[in-house]
Image: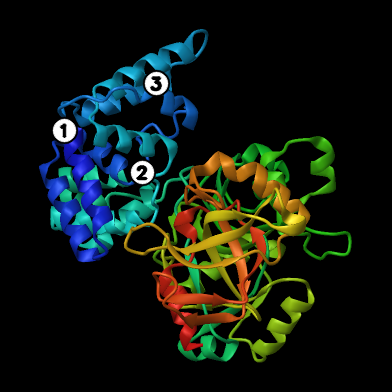
Amino acid sequence: MHLDDVVRASAELTATRSRKAKTAILAELLNAAPPGELAAAVAFLTGRPTQGRIGIGWRTLAELRGEPAARPELTVTDVDTALGEVAATSGSGSARRRAEVLGTLFARATPAEQEFLFRLLTGELRQGALEGVMVDGVAAATGVPVELVRRAFMLSGSLPATAGAAVAGGAPALRAFRLELGRPIRPMLASPAESLDDALAELGDVVVEYKMDGARIQVHRDGDDVRVYTRTLREVTKHVGELADLVRELPCRSVVLDGETLALTDDGRPRPFQETMSRFGSTREEQVRELLLRPYFFDCLHLDGTDLLDAPLRDRNTALRDVAGEHVTPGETQPADPAALLDASLDAGHEGVMVKDLDAPYAAGRRGRAWLKVKPSHTLDLVVLAAEWGHGRRTGYLSNLHLGARDPDGGPPIMVGKTFKGLTDELLAWQTERFPELERRRDDWTVYLRPELVVEIELDGVQTSTRYPGGVALRFARVLRYRPDKQAADADTIDAVRAMLRG
């Protein structure tokens, strides 16, 4: 398969907002891809080369582009092989060799192919929302049920591997995927509820738990081997030794636990979220001593050889309490006074409560309605699209943020508003230093960014608006914090923003 086929499919995906049309485009390409090139084609279209990040910077790539080829001749295999060589090259002279390989690759690429490769290697194609459409495309191309594709992707964590299995072995190959100790799965996500009463009315039998302002963790134990992963499936075991030691002492042989971790003050209240997150990148002994992390587990996905993903939450909760004991997130099943639980959570310094359907299985990687979050204030996780240079005392700083909601059909984020409120002097300085690293282009007033950073925004609500392409605008938006634990694919969708109109 020629790279040009992938480039043209990518352009067609960008040109349409119809999920049905996107699915058809992907299905056609997947049907045309030879088995040996399928994985790479899927990886390219979802913005993640099979090798992952290859460690080449924006400026280096810009210098390597050079004169393009007149006609398309590159194949998907040519590109995948070249990127594999770049990723494997290390040691003395590696920078020169990597530049030679990429320079040759760019010289063989047409202008459109050069642009595609540049965006692929700089991360600008990394549209996580497109993964959902790719799941539909794999199902359409192979004739297998979309739920089977989604489940296999959940368990494998790899769309290329999932697509390859679907093409090679159909439904039986997809059913063969299992939870594997040491291989993290995509976390189940919650949707917002307007109020506690609404959440309780929507679900049947429930457990109501504290919603903590911590960092999501997934812990795998196999004997004495313990591994800790973030919500983005990055392993952080070496940074959080106290968590690994704690799980190693639990009364089991093997377990997979889902939960959150927090750094607490001396009086047991949660420290700021940024302090908890700082531990995921540090092994300095003084910081570890000062910021010991405490885990709070709220789900058990595997216990002593038994996978529990398909079991109802009531059964997973029983297993959780048997194995995690005092480390279970505070909460009650069918509480007599849910409002008192909400008040207690807020009084303890947490965000609110989670209301969860006791009959629901673990729907990894999905934001459904089986888990509902109840918070006293409206917040959204949005993508930073650009920032304007400030005025007055903010002169010289990148200040006013352009905010976008995720397109659930895989398109670029959809702008829904701007804000400069809530930005501290520290955040202004950080933005001004960090944003140029993500710069796509700029004009006299604005620096436009690759859509990678997620920021948590507090707002009074939304209103209809013709000013922004999504038809809605944020009301009295203010910055709460940046979310380094989240990717653009984890941001709230435009549908979630529009749903706030009803509130």
**x, y (%) of residue 287?**
81, 42
**Total marks placed:** 3
Q: Secondary structure at mark 1?
A: loop
**x, y (%) of residue 163?**
24, 46
Disc 2 crowd, CA 10 A, few/some/many (<14, 14-19, 20+)? many
**CB under 8 Å between callouts 1 and 3?**
no
Left or right of 84 in this view: 196: right
Residue at coordinates 34% horizontally, 58% vertically from top-left? 411
Disc 3 crowd, CA 10 A, few/some/many (<14, 14-19, 20+)? many
**x, y (%) of residue 2?**
16, 33
Q: Is residue 330 above or below residue 144?
A: below
The amino acid sitting under disc 2 is: Gly
Q: Nearer the viewer, residue 413 or 129?
A: 413
Q: Nearer the viewer, residue 27 or 267?
A: 27
Give the residue pinned by disc 2.
47
Q: Residue furthest top?
A: 92
Among the 4 quarters of the image, the one containing residue 317: bottom right
Is residue 144 among the parts visible in the rendering?
no
Give the residue pinned by disc 1.
2
Q: CA distance from mark 1 to mark 3?
A: 20 Å
Q: CA distance from mark 2 to mark 1?
A: 17 Å
Counting residues from the start of the chain, the first of labels 1 and 3 encountered is 1
The amino acid sitting under disc 3 is: Val
Left or right of 203 in this view: 120: left
Q: Secondary structure at mark 3?
A: helix
Q: CA distance from mark 3 to mark 2?
A: 17 Å
Q: Is residue 364 above or below residue 350?
A: above
Give the residue pinned by disc 3.
86
Counting residues from the start of the chain, the first of labels 3 and 2 encountered is 2
